[in-house]
């Protein structure tokens, strides 16, 4: 996953964007870049390597000024990681500049058509195709940037979080999302954009998370305008007050995030079962299960879908569920599940597990299961994430931010939640006597 950061306001954008990119480093990337609007021009600095390398490059290119800018960390999908393919990308006229997280699946046919109409390409990326498509639409249809982005995105198949601005109209940024996360931070006469809230949490607690197929026109001095990409319907921004604490996402005195997160496990596990496992009363209380108990008790089987570490948590959960709750469980890799033609019925319960709540294959598996009428339950760590929103019900793991790439507390808290569910179902099915249940819990 790459990282997106942007700023429009009256402060210098450079330090905000660079610090923000550093906060998003945990997402993994191979190159980094920044575009700043300064002296009626857009200056881009970009490089393969780390954000620190970008800092050196931007300084050597004297590109540090401007109150409007976009920054990006790239995880290459189209074209090797090198300076040229790094984002941001200009359109042919150099008026538009874009950053993009995701994949444009039909970029080849669009590129061919654009080349046939005289467009030239300097990079191997799908992203450069998109920015030129936006530019062509804007000029041909004589529409504003927001409208051009909308029309262009309706021609695109794929996944994206994008941010784009126009050199000739430097008071707005247009953003859009489908399948990749994008948050907008709302300050006083200033706006921030980012892949998650960590780049702007020290400036504002107010944020809007774009939903899939939504776009926003972020204009200085104006309220954010949200629209549905497909049908142009107006959407109303749901402004959340974030509780995220900056210290939570820094290293807290440990040499590495991973070490910190290993030591955080007892606290994270406690946070996960606190208020749910009521040992004295011999009960497990989980709202998402309580409200849908019949679905679980009548389920023919439970299908667990996940990727990577979460999939391993699912494998452990299979043993726990079958042993305690006596419900048949199948564990599936989400990327396999979504591309085959699985048999799913209305009597199945699908449990989707994901730390970030943004795992694309798991999200696709959720959509598939919902279409087939299954009841879908999410287990994820990030509050308000896509999986949390897409599922019928769910339980958060409360592990806190996990920055280390090798999972620690996210995994152990997933096992905690899944064990709680198995315990609860076992008790509801009367598999354990009250005294046995009490004994297990204490
Ligand atoms: N598909 C784009 C590229 O390869 C964006 C990749 C990303 O998400 O960083 O440049």
Image (cartoon, rainbow, N blue to C red):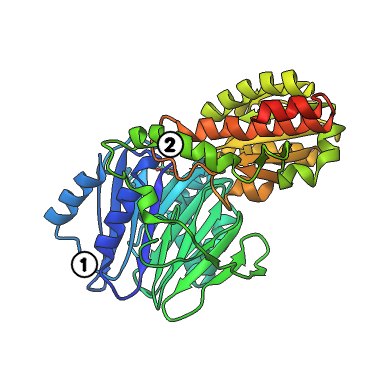
Please tell me how crowded label 2 is: few (under 14), some (14-19), or many (20+) other residues with Cα within 10 Å: some
Q: Where is the N terminus found, in terms of image quarters?
A: top left
> Mark 1 vs ligand 1: CB under 8 Å?
no
Which quadrant would residue 190 be assigned to in this image? bottom left
Q: Is residue 96 visible?
A: no
Read off the residue under disc 1: 65
Residue 86's x, y, as percent?
A: 32, 45
Residue 303's x, y, as percent?
A: 73, 28
* Closer-to-camera residue (429/123): 429
**Up-down: is 390 above or below 430?**
below
Residue under the point 34% across and 62% down: 93
* Closer-to-camera residue (124/309): 309
First-in-chain label (1 vs 2): 1
Residue under the point 63% across and 70% down: 236
Read off the residue under disc 2: 77
| Apparent side of residue 56 relative to residue 1 in the rendered image (left or right) | left
Q: Marks 2 and 1: in contact by CB < 8 Å?
A: no
Query: In what quadrant does ligand 1 lie?
Result: top left
* Closer-to-camera residue (203/327): 327
Q: CA distance from mark 1 to mark 2?
A: 30 Å
Give residue 343's mark. Answer: none
Helix, strand or loop at label 2? It is: loop
**Up-down: is 333 above or below 131?**
above
Residue 110's x, y, as percent?
A: 52, 47
Which quadrant would residue 49 be assigned to in this image? top left
* Closer-to-camera residue (116/23): 23
Q: Please identify, in this view, whether the residue under mark 1 or under mark 2 is nearer the observer.
A: 1
| Residue lying furthest left | 60
Q: Where is the C terminus found, in terms of image quarters?
A: top right
Q: Is residue 245 visible?
A: yes
Residue 58's x, y, as percent?
A: 19, 54
């Amino acid at each position: 996953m790459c990282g997106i950061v942007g700023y429009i306001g009256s402060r210098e954008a450079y330090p905000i964007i660079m610090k923000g990119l550093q906060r998003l480093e945990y997402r993994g990337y191979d190159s980094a870049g920044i575009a700043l609007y300064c002296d009626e021009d857009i200056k881009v600095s970009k490089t393969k390597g780390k954000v620190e390398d970008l800092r050196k490059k931007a300084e050597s290119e004297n590109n540090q000024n401007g109150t409007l800018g976009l920054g990006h960390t790239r995880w290459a999908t189209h074209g090797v990681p090198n300076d040229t393919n790094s984002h941001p990308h200009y359109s042919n006229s150099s008026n538009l500049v874009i950053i993009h997280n995701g994949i444009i699946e039909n970029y080849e046919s669009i590129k061919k058509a654009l080349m046939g109409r005289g467009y030239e390409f300097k990079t191997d990326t799908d992203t450069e195709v998109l920015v030129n498509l936006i530019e062509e639409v804007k000029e041909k249809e004589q529409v504003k940037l927001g409208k051009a982005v909308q029309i262009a995105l309706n021609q695109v198949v794929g996944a994206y979080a994008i941010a784009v601005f126009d050199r000739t109209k430097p008071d707005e940024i247009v953003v859009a999302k489908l399948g990749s996360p994008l948050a907008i931070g709302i300050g006083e006469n200033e706006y921030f954009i980012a892949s998650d809230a960590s780049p702007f949490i020290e400036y504002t607690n107010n944020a809007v998370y774009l939903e899939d197929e939504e776009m926003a026109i972020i204009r200085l001095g104006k309220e954010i305008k949200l629209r549905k990409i497909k049908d142009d319907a107006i959407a109303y921004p749901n402004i959340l007050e974030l509780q995220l604490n900056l210290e939570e996402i820094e290293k807290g005195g440990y040499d590495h995030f991973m070490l910190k997160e290993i030591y955080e496990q007892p606290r994270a596990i406690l946070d996960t079962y606190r208020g749910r496992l009521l040992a004295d009363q011999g009960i497990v209380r989980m709202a998402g299960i309580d409200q849908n108990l019949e679905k679980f008790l009548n389920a023919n089987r439970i299908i667990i879908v996940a990727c990577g570490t979460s999939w391993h948590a699912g494998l452990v959960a299979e043993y726990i569920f079958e042993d305690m709750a006596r419900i048949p469980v199948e564990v599936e890799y989400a990327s396999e599940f979504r591309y085959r033609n699985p048999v799913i019925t209305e009597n199945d319960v699908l449990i989707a597990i994901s730390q970030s709540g943004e795992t694309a294959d798991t999200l696709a598996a959720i959509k598939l299961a919902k279409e087939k009428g299954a009841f879908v339950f999410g287990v994820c760590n990030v509050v308000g994430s896509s999986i949390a929103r897409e599922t019928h019900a769910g339980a958060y793991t409360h592990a806190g931010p996990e920055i280390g790439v090798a999972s620690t507390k996210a995994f152990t808290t997933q096992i905690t939640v899944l064990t709680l569910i198995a315990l609860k179902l076992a008790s509801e099915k009367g598999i354990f006597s009250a005294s046995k249940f009490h004994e297990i819990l204490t």
